[in-house]
Amino acid sequence: MKVCKNVSTFYRSVMVALALAFISTANADDIFAYNISLNTSTLRAASGVSYALDFQFNNGDAILGNNTVTFSNYDLGGGTTSAALPTTLTDGFANDYQDPFTPGDHISYTLTMTNAFSGDPNFYSPDEFTFSILDGNGNDINTTSPNGSFITIDTSEVGGPQSASAYSFGNITATIVAVPEPSIWLLTLLGLVGMGILALTRQNCASGGQI
Amino acid sequence: MRIIDKALLGFIACFGWSFSAVAADVLTYHNDNARTGVNPDEISLTPQNVRADAFGLKFKLIVDGQLYAEPLYVSSVPIFNGSQFLGRHNIIVVATEHDSVYAFDADSGKLYWQISLIGPGEIPSDNRNCPSAVSPEIGVTSTPVIDRGIGPYGTIYVLAMTRAANTLTYFYRLHALDLLTGKDVLAPALIQASYPDPGGHGPNYDPATSNINFDPAFSEQRAALVLANGLIYTAWASFCDIPPSSGWIIAYDEKTLTQTYVLNVDPDETPAINPPSSAAGIWQSGAGAAVDEQGNLYLATANGPFDPNFDQGGFPITGDYGDTFLRLSPTLKVTDFFTPSDQLLRTTDDLDLGSGGSMVLPDLYDSSNQVHHLAVTAGKEPTMYIINRDNLGRYNPAGDVIYQRIPGVLGPFGVWSAPAYFNEALYFGPIDTTMMRFTFKYAKLDTVPDSVTSTIFYYPGTNPTISSLGNTNGIVWAAEATNTAQGQEVLHAYDALDVGTELYNSAQSGIRDQFGVSSKFIVPTISNGKVYIGATGLPGTIVGNNPSSGTVGVFGLFNPTPATDVSSTIQVIRGGFRYLPTTGHFIQLVTLTNTGAAPVPFPVSLVLDNLSTGAVLANANGATTIVSPVASQYVNAPLTSSLEPSQSVTVRLDFIDTLKQPILYTTRVLAGVNSR
């Protein structure tokens, strides 16, 4: 039994460590991930009209470049762009990435975003990621957002959750779904493995077995 | 993780009037490019407190020349002494016929800078043998225009006339002045232009180029400058119809002062059938051309020849457009026109269609909920023309075919002024009669006024200008030129819902509120609880060795009640910045939540203090003037009533950031219908 007790204590310590690690990821340096999608079949139907995708990551706090957004899993639903889609953006002044775009049925991608904030929140503002679609004149397809975007994600001033919002334009509806980061999946998986081992240990100990 | 998918229909609806109405500043003639003449964000001045025992003359600004240009108001300007930052201040910009431009503190009257636009070896122009117009000297006649997004802190565009001191050589120059110092930020553009004259009839015809050339000695620039499409548009007429002159419109790039487009609407300079004629000059009693959302310009020409022989597109072959209401593309192509069927009579009898200002009306809906895109104009004849901007009506000698023609309503002699619009009503100030209010019903204007003033406005009538808080607290302000040689100018205020109710006039309190001698074409400027109104200086007043001085009377409440600071019960959550590449502006959304137990009274204003010096709000509804710190811009929350406990509301901030530096500020929240 002594052996079992020691083993159990060891695995419980591992679990506590994993839990602490998980909690720590919710603080200022956390990375949040989102699945973003828009149905763009309405735009596709308007043949002959030119558009551009507009990705922005603008600084608001005391440090330029202290946050990053990373893009993956692009799916334009048959649409095309005339330049490469961005893979990463760092917050900057008027950091605007535009890409001429022929719409398909939909747009989807996964976005991960860090969450640092620097400076006195009585003076400074969050860093902000926005995703928009521009018309041929470079103006927004004005959405229900007062800033004209389909997606807006702000870093948190207090190290807590980011503020993420999705908007629409007519039949074009944006959705945004939070997804755990791979590291969080890994932590969860490790936690499940740990719990399994712990359960197995208890079972073995209860039956007098040795490990 | 907080995911917010906001339902914002109500939010957008609430933003309706606050988005379209930006009133902290008056940067152009009659408030906006539509020329509505309305400041819809005036909180301090109400029909209740604008009365002689509470409201009157606060102080006067004395300047070195007569005033024809409307004073312009610029809120929250950072002021420096060398490199020392002295804080932000609201300023008023005044341009005179002595070719001076002034920047005064709008709240204290302190002079920040004065600059002369007279070049070396030059003097202001003489009156060009036209003593009945601007006299004895001509300098800056047109209302300047200001762009806060150009230059480090904003740029004033102003057009000045001078002449050589020792010869009768005349010059016009378009200046771009730094808002902070008054100094030229670009080399001034000397106005020169030419335009094809296939017939070769013009006195200024140059056979080498087959063009006529612009002649500054015979061109008067009275219509307000127009800023649209990144261009400064200038429009030109004659001095007392003295030939050779013609109707020029000349555009310049606002960033370079490079000439971009030229149009002449009487290119052979023919002075109609019986001279004198203004040859289709554009003067509009000082009003600027109206501009629609697509950047098209609308203006009316004075008397001059009109060619009824049309090309395949239906336009006059010779390009002669006397007495015509024009739609011009941003590149100054005539894209449509309306010429009254009595054009020939107007030309021979000097009945300018273009003696008054035109206005682009807001979208109006008929009983079938069909939207109408309309404009209104009127001239030296008592007919009002409501015109469909999508199809102006062209020329039909058998009778006008336009949206609505209302004959005989604008007094005996028509208008030498610009109308105003408020709450589906039009306000006209014709000459030798009362000021009138006409109302729209389902996109049609009533053909009789529903109220008129008891005041008779003699020549040149009056330019009604309106302050309000949204659709409430409407006040119509009007300058009266008393009909005597040295008569005092009078400021009147009327209830905008019934102009038969006079709230105040500056003659009610003896000499207390006298501010100057009557002048012509005066337009009051109203912002942040004060009224600024130009006049000729008092007799005997000599400023800068110039006996023809001018004044600006500054009116306001004697004891304004301060708004309540509710910052302690309002949680302010900032979003980040979104960049608008087409304008260069930054948009930020800020959420206000009432964390207190009591409602916060309407209107609720988010005040930005300590704002980075290179930043300014493009959509401010006002700026503080009595609740310290002053000269801080604010934006009103999109509410129609109080902010209830636990209720949140999102405020949209639209920043210009000329220095391209981080936008920093602290916040305050003020509430209630009292002065900020």
Image: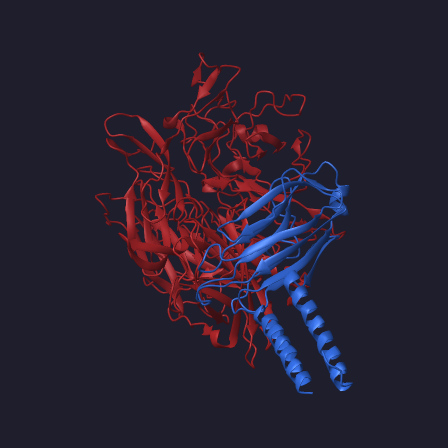
Chain colours: A blue, B red
Name the residue furthest front. A210
In this rendering, would B86 be left or right of B421?
left
Outermost residue, bottom direction? A1
Q: Nearer the viewer, residue B193 or B126?
A: B193
Residue A183 in the image: above or below residue A49 = below
Q: Nearer the viewer, residue B537 or A26?
A: A26
- Quarter that holds the N terminus of chain B: bottom right
Total marks in image = 0
Q: Position of residue A61 (x, y in %)?
A: 47, 60
Residue B383 screen position, x and y as percent = 59, 41
Image coords of residue B356 (percent x, y): 51, 41
User: Farthest residue in the top direction?
Assistant: B208
Residue B399 image-quadrant placement: top right
Q: Quadrant of the C terminus of chain B?
A: bottom left
Could you tell whether B652 is left or right of B314 in the image? left
Q: Where residue A199 sits in the image (x, y, percent)?
A: 74, 79
| Outermost left residue | B545
Left or right of B318? Residue B282 is left
Residue name at image x 45 percent, y 74 percent = B565
One can see residue B13 in this view = no
Q: Is residue B350 left or right of residue B191?
A: right
| Residue B199 seen by the camera | yes
Decide which of B645, B406 is in the foreground and name it: B645
Task: Give me the residue at 55% from left, 24% from top.
Answer: B320
Q: Is residue B510 shown above or below B265?
A: below
B538 in relation to A8, above or below = above
Which image quarter: residue B602? Answer: bottom right
